Image (cartoon, coloured by chain):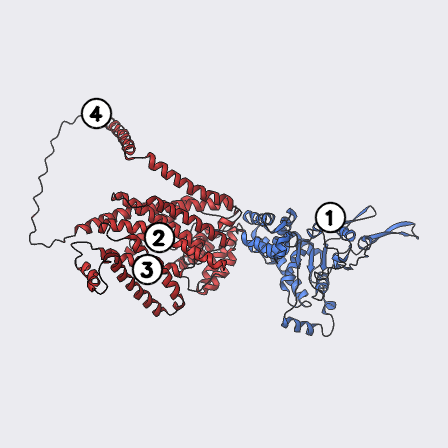
Amino acid sequence: MNESTTDTQMAAVSEVAEKLAASVGRVIVGKAAAVELLTVALLCEGHILIEDVPGTGKTILAKALARSLGCSFKRIQCTPDLLPADVTGIHYYNQKTGEFELRPGPVMSNILLVDEINRATPRTQSCLLEAMQEQQVTVDLETVPLPRPFLVIATQNPVEMSGTFPLPEAQLDRFLIRIGLGYPDEAEEYEILERFREGNPAVSLESVVTAEDLLEMQGRCRQVRIAEPVRNYIAAITRATRQHEGLRLGASPRATLGLGHASQALAAIRGRDYVMPDDVKLLAVPALAHRVIQKTESRLKGKSAVAVISEVVASVAVPAEE
Amino acid sequence: MRQRWLTWALYSVAMGLEACWLLALLDLASEQTTGGIVSPAGLLALLPLSFLLHRFTERWRRLTLLDRVLTWLSGAIALLLAIKLLLYSGMAWADTTWLLSLPRAFGDIFNTFGAPLLVLPATALLWWLGRRLARQTTGFKALLGEFQFGLFMLVITLVSARLFELELSGQVPLVLGFFGLSLAGLSVSHGMEGASWLSGIYRTPWSGLLLAAIGIILVAGLIIGLIFTPDLLQIIWSAIKTVLEFIWAGILKVLEFLASLMPDTGEVDLPIPEAPPPAASDDNGFSLRMPEWARTALTSGWLIIMSGLILLALWRISTEILRHLRLMMGGRSGTEYESLAGSFRDDMRGLFRRMFGWLKLFKRIRWRRDAAPAGQAVTSVRQTYRHFLRWAAAGGYPRELAQTPCEYRDMIGGLLPELSQDIDAITAQYVSTRYGEASPAPPELQLMNHSWQRLRQVKLKKMKGQNNL
């Protein structure tokens, strides 16, 4: 593939990302970085975990993204009595036809918003594992492929711990990135009041990208080059998490892959056909912080996983001249 | 509180390291110039005195004029006290004859080297060292510098003492004390900072290597001193001479054989050149007389300079080797570092530039790499970037290892906005070449080269109070 073709293709990806950001930006005030990370996850078929206090716009963000994509969107509000069948669907007996038919659950959509995932029981949480990883679900021994693109946006509230079931490490590792939205600043809060004064602007959003375009963009992102030094850099970061004294469990090889793919997507969003160490550094914390388990001593010292990953990144040398 | 005690401990260690080599140096100078009249230990007392005084006057540091006046005034008082207490201790304070000893020594300089003439530079050096130590922040880096410089000075002094056939007192305890203090100080400072290469994941092997190296040096030194006696050295030198004479005899035989193959042209008597006429004696001319002590001092100085250059070269070589080993062991996969040969080549070039640059000799001589006219492109994008990094580091803006080229560009561009355009051009080309694996087109290479040529003309100087972002 010659350079000009690659440049054009990456320019197209960048343009799509800009359109998405602009569309979502009509609803969500500020949070450009979070929207960019969402777009990264979207372009590399990764799943997103949004962890934040209530009322910061998690659900609205997911809805705005879904509407902008013109894809099917379903929402699950997790509660302790949610059953796996409520997620995947059931076979019911159709008296007219005399056969069992599949009633697909909300998981059979392009974008699935799972609100307060930590309130669902581990049994229900685990039924999402197959969906997120294998892009398929098994309902009564029948394996059903999920539509493409398929994106899970899960939210959880880090404040309320009673009546919750913290996500196991195996499931956390399946989320590509974890983001937090945070409270808006003063100017943003005024803007929110103004914007939502007459109603929800998300209702009037139109799709700016079709599902087919999105699939094509995802394919182009995979063509972004990762030079050998940058590949080594990615691997060095994840290996360094396994050797950090503050972590009981470091990042897995899945995390290495995820970081690599996410870096490709970010490079494409920025119009480049190659990954730079800056892309890797920017994505290291969102992509790795939720996948590691801290030691108790480290937590007791007041260090968060984010701080530990930042430390790791700051200790790994960037592949550049010296 | 603990931190304060540790800081004072480090200051004491730094002063101890300086005291070790200063004691040896002053002892040598005193023996060589004044026959041991001036007590080196007595002079050395000025170092802690200066340190304490300048720590006390630290609060007035910002009042530059007052600070300088205090330093000079206190230095002058220290000089007079040193002369009085070390040279004229038996004389009464009321008798002011001792006050004139220094001007008298200057007046008699062409006949003899008076003891006050040694006390003057020694006092100045000690006073300055005490002030420097008091005003600097001590840490691992500072102590490492003290160790390196102290080792260098100690070796120079001991070698010079051997050259002059002088026996300095307490050489062994001095050297042991030096190494012991440096080991203690480096361990404490390393423990305080925890950020040096000795505290990384390779700290155990590196600490072991450091201890082993010190142990090996000490043991090897003792063994070498025991084994390589002058007689043994004489035997070795005789053996080398015999071998060289044998080889030379062989070469002469080969030349004779080759000459025998040539046709005999007969002996030709070459005219004997006339002896040159004897030089006319210039009885009425002015001849510069040099005191014997000055001649000795100049000769000794020349020997010391040559020995110093050799040791400096050895020091640079060992530093580069250690740096190379550190990089290799540091597990920085993907990080590029220059080969040893390239480092030495650049070092030698830089050394010659520094030595002869003030003569402006080398401005007109183009080095092999710069031989091309300004219009031609630099051969390698990565090489240019490396040169750019070194130029910036020499100006006080080194790139951190975990800093990406773009982050570094933003940092240095923010600090030097007038150069940001050229820095952007160099960084952009490097990034696309290195990470994009793109071959730069000639115009792009030229643009990068022009940017670099413009940057290298600028002599960077880090502004006071300016920190890397």
Residue at (39, 68) in percent of width and height: B60
**For the residues carrying marks 2 and 4, which lies nearer the camera in this image?**
2
Give me the chain letter of mark 3: B
Residue at (33, 59) in percent of width and height: B128
User: How crowded is the residue under tag 1: few (<14 C-alpha within 10 Å), some, or many (20+)?
Assistant: few
Residue to which mark 2 is pinned: B19
Could you give the CA–CA distance between mark 2 and mark 1, rounded to whole angstroms?
71 Å
**For the residues carrying marks 2 and 1, which lies nearer the camera in this image?**
2
Residue at (41, 39) in percent of width and height: B216
Specify which label sits upstream in the sequence, 2 or 3. Answer: 2
**Label 4: element kind:** helix
Give me the chain letter of mark 4: B
Query: Chain A colour?
Result: blue
- Numbered tag placed on residue A134 in the rendering: 1
Task: Indicate the amino acid at tag 1.
Answer: Glu
Could you give the CA–CA distance between mark 2 and mark 4, rounded to whole angstroms?
68 Å
Q: Is A271 on the left or on the right of B97, as rendered?
A: right
Residue to which mark 4 is pinned: B260
**For the residues carrying marks 4 and 1, which lies nearer the camera in this image?**
1
Give me the chain letter of mark 2: B
Could you give the CA–CA distance between mark 3 and mark 4, rounded to whole angstroms?
73 Å
Task: Indicate the amino acid at tag 4.
Answer: Ser
**Label 3: element kind:** helix
Residue at (22, 51) in percent of width and height: B34
User: How crowded is the residue under tag 2: few (<14 C-alpha within 10 Å), some, or many (20+)?
Assistant: many
Query: Chain B colour?
Result: red
**Label 2: element kind:** helix
**Label 1: element kind:** helix
Q: Position of residue A300 (x, y in %)?
A: 63, 56
User: How crowded is the residue under tag 4: few (<14 C-alpha within 10 Å), some, or many (20+)?
Assistant: few
Residue to which mark 3 is pinned: B127
